[in-house]
Image: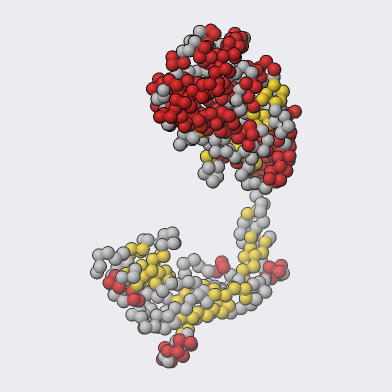
Amino acid sequence: MNPNCKTTCGKTSIPYPFGMGEDPTCFRHSMFNITCDESSKPPKALLRGQEVLDISLQGQLRIKFPIGWDCYSESGIQTDYDPGFSFNISGSPYTFSNTRNKFTAIGCDTQAYVKSNPYVEYFLKKRDHHFRFGCMSSCWSTTSVINGSCTGIGCCQSVIPADLKSSLLISIFDGYADIDECKDEKTHNCKQMCINMPGGYNCKCREGYHGDGWNNGTGCTADPKEFPLVKVILGTGLSLLFLLTASTWTYWFWRKRRSMKLKEKFFQQNGGLMLQQKINTHRSDAFKIFTIEELERATNNYDASTIVGQGGFGIVYKGVLPNNRIVAIKKSKLVDASQIDQFINELDILSQVNHRNVVKLLGCCLEDQVPILVYEFISNGTLYHYIHEGGHLPSISLKNRLRIAAEIAEALAYLHSAASMPIFHRDIKSANILLDNNFTVKVADFGVSKLVPIDHTQITTLVTGTWGYLDPECLQTGKLTDKSDVYSFGVVLLELLTGEKVVCLNRSHDDRNLATYFVNVMKDNRLFQVLEERVRSEASEEQLMAIAQLPLRCLKLKGEKRPTMKEVVVDLQRLRGLHNQPSVHDQETERLLCETSQDCTDDAGGHSSIGGHFDMSLTLSR
């Protein structure tokens, strides 16, 4: 026998010449091929669809046949019938054992027999295989049947013919029409309850009584009166369980309904209907209004481990949307209910901003008390980190510093002039400049940005922003212009060139503000003392002087003397070209210096004075 053949199916042993599988060497004959039904628990061995119970090497195989039945209603009408089985083993090496098998029928007034299949006889031309055998059982009632006995009372048995191989058909006949003795008290002998049975009836006592229920027996006697403690406890417990379940369900339903009403209230309060109308007008799928549940799932219910940043305006979480897109989710801390309409207008405009150097606003959620904004996630940190915290500044070449400055300028120029409505950022600083994996600039955090009507060049507003980056003219007048962003950009450019912090208590009192410090340095002709070492080593003195003029122009005290961001973009393109082509820089450097020298002279002192004034009016602590 092939040692690779499987020899068991569940708890049933399959010895050779029987076997399983498709390998013909595992069994002697195809009729000895056993199928193992492993979908059953435990697995079942099957031979031609019939369950194999055990196999004996003395030449016997025991299988399990289905049971046939014939059922009738109380009125004597047949309600269910199943002949049991028809099993053909003709042409196989098997025969039914006439010594180990018995045909058994159970029931009162039941006649059952087995006969050969006439169709098989006809098609196989084997008239000599015709047979019929069976038995009959009867009983007056179920009480007359002895358990374990099969002597013809409720159960009968018959042997089967020798060498039986042909198909079998079972026929069952109920030899009577059931009579319900319980319908008439004169036809039964019960004390209280009569139960009709096939071929008879049985007696039973009602609940609260005991006895056999027969008039000629022990009859029915009332049980002694006892307090139904078990029933009371069971009833009380079930009642409490029902009340608890009902209360829990009611509370859950109330909370869910209250939550839905709150979400609807906040959605309308935060201008959701207005925003939906504006989005439908644009017919764009780029901006989405999220549900609060979507953002809770994205941030694992705003788990603290997902926080990537926080400040005065709110907390930023890292979230993952169902499409596996990573996003930044900003929960603001404050909202001015009187400015909701303006906020929705700003949100609508910002959703249409599409520039490679501006963080994309993907959507918002208005179902919370404070609107939640969803941005694209920028993974490589902030420019502030690379300049002041990460210790990476010396590794950044002057070429890349100018590129970063140019990309910031291009983003601001786009917001000021190329967007559908001019947008003033109002909080440009190195901490709001993000860098992606390719160190491409992404201007972020429009939490305090302002939209400007096309026919306006300035708006009056509360002064907001970050100390050290604030436009001194805006601080004095309260009037916000595009030149306010130019001033803040000039401070960021100084950070890139010097590596110095915007406010530093280690510098002298008059020089604590970086802008004031730089103006004083330029007045004293000490530029090379403040520039970062790598910047000094990668450009000539003339080139560095030309580069230094740009932040100086951006930091003019009067906004009208500052360049526009478009002009800054042009200047940076020129400076980058100048840095990349050192052989032709002399004339270009001289021209840039000449363009800005007059501006440098008359405004430096004024800037220093105002800068010192602001510095003195602010109390700083370490």
Q: How many marks?
A: 0
Q: Quadrant of residue 184?
A: bottom right
Q: Residue at x 56, y 66 (%)?
A: 143
Q: Residue at x 57, y 22 (%)?
A: 554
Above or below, 90 against 543 in this view is: below
Judge whether residue 237 can be spotted in this image. no
Task: Tell me how the rendering is colored.
Answer: secondary structure
How far across and down, in percent of the image, does residue 342 sit?
A: 72, 32
How far across and down, in percent of the image, does residue 360 sit?
A: 58, 38
Q: Residue at x 68, y 68 (%)?
A: 182
Q: Quadrant of residue 458?
A: top right
Q: Residue at x 61, y 68 (%)?
A: 197
How far across and down, in percent of the image, does residue 407 sit?
A: 52, 33
Position of 379 compared to 214: left or right?
left
Quarter of the rendering occupied by the N terminus: bottom left
Judge whether residue 68 can be spotted in this image. yes
Foreground residue among 360 and 605:
605
Foreground residue among 469 and 264:
469
Question: What is the residue that sits farthest to the right in this orientation?
Answer: 338
Above or below, 264 against 70 in this view is: above
Foreground residue among 59 and 285:
285
